[in-house]
Amino acid sequence: MKLDLRPLLAGDRLLNFEYELMPDIDSQDTSSFLYGVSFPSPMKVKGDITNTAGYMRMHLTMQLEYNSFCARCLSPVSGKFSLDLEKTVAPRNLLGDLDDTKLDDYAIIEDGFLDMDEQLIAQMEMEFPVRFLCKEDCKGLCQKCGKNLNEGPCTCSSAELDPRMAPLKKLLEQMKKEENNKN
Ligand SMILES: [Zn+2]
Ligand SMILES: [Zn+2]
């Protein structure tokens, strides 16, 4: 979506906008920040740009429902992601001397138009969660038998101890013994 800011540049004081946008990001691409995430409905974008004597400020909110998977137990996870974004809006020719890091603070008008989608995707890339959990204390899957440990313990977890853990177990028993001797 490209917003026509020419009325604001000509002196209008307020521009409201509201639209929907389907995220155009390949979530099958493993290098994408949205790998494994899908969207059942488009982004809902809403906001305004105010113009106070030539100083323009944009405020927008975006909401997006997503479907993904728990990073530990692989069960489906869905939820709602939202963004709240505020930026100063300025024509490129007024920002000539700023370096790239400072330019990130601005929404830049090119030839009278503002590319909203670019801003949204860039912000989303910074704030979208890297991974999801079905719940904070998800127990995950047993590494041996693959059972979902949220549904209860599996038989292999208690029966045998990982040999790499044996020295630690000995140490813990030793400490316990010393503790008992003190009392
Ligand atoms: Zn989980
Ligand atoms: Zn198991």
Image: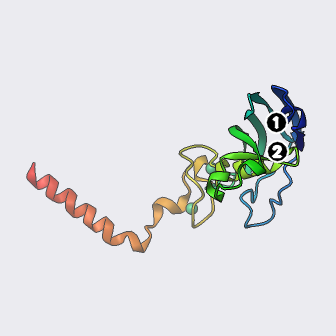
Residue 174, by quadrant, is bottom left
x 55%, y 44%: residue: 136
Estimate the x, y position of residue 175 in percent, counting from the top left: 20, 60
Closer to us: 137 or 97 = 97
- What's the CA distance linking mark 1 and mark 2? 10 Å
x 58%, y 52%: residue: 149
Q: Horizontal placement of 73 versus 63: left or right?
A: left
Q: In which quarter of the image is the N terminus?
A: top right
* Residue at the disc numbered 2: 116
Looking at the rendered structure, the secondary structure element under dot 1 is strand
Closer to us: 62 or 67 = 62
Q: In the picture shown, does residue 88 fall above or below 126?
A: above
Q: Can residue 39 be seen in this view?
A: no
x 81%, y 63%: residue: 28
Q: In the picture shown, does residue 128 fall above or below 158?
A: above
Q: Horizontal placement of 136 versus 84: left or right?
A: left
Task: In the displayed orientation, state which residue is furthest to the left.
Answer: 182
Amino acid carrying label 2: it is: Met
Estimate the x, y position of residue 92 in percent, counting from the top left: 77, 50
Q: Can residue 119 be seen in this view?
A: yes
Which numbered mark, 1 or 2, is in the foreground of this view? 2
Looking at the rendered structure, the secondary structure element under dot 2 is helix
* Residue at the disc numbered 1: 45
Closer to us: 109 or 76 = 109
Task: Give residue 5's mark.
Answer: none
Tags 1 and 2 touching, CB below 8 Å: yes
Q: In the picture shown, does residue 142 fall above or below 57?
A: below
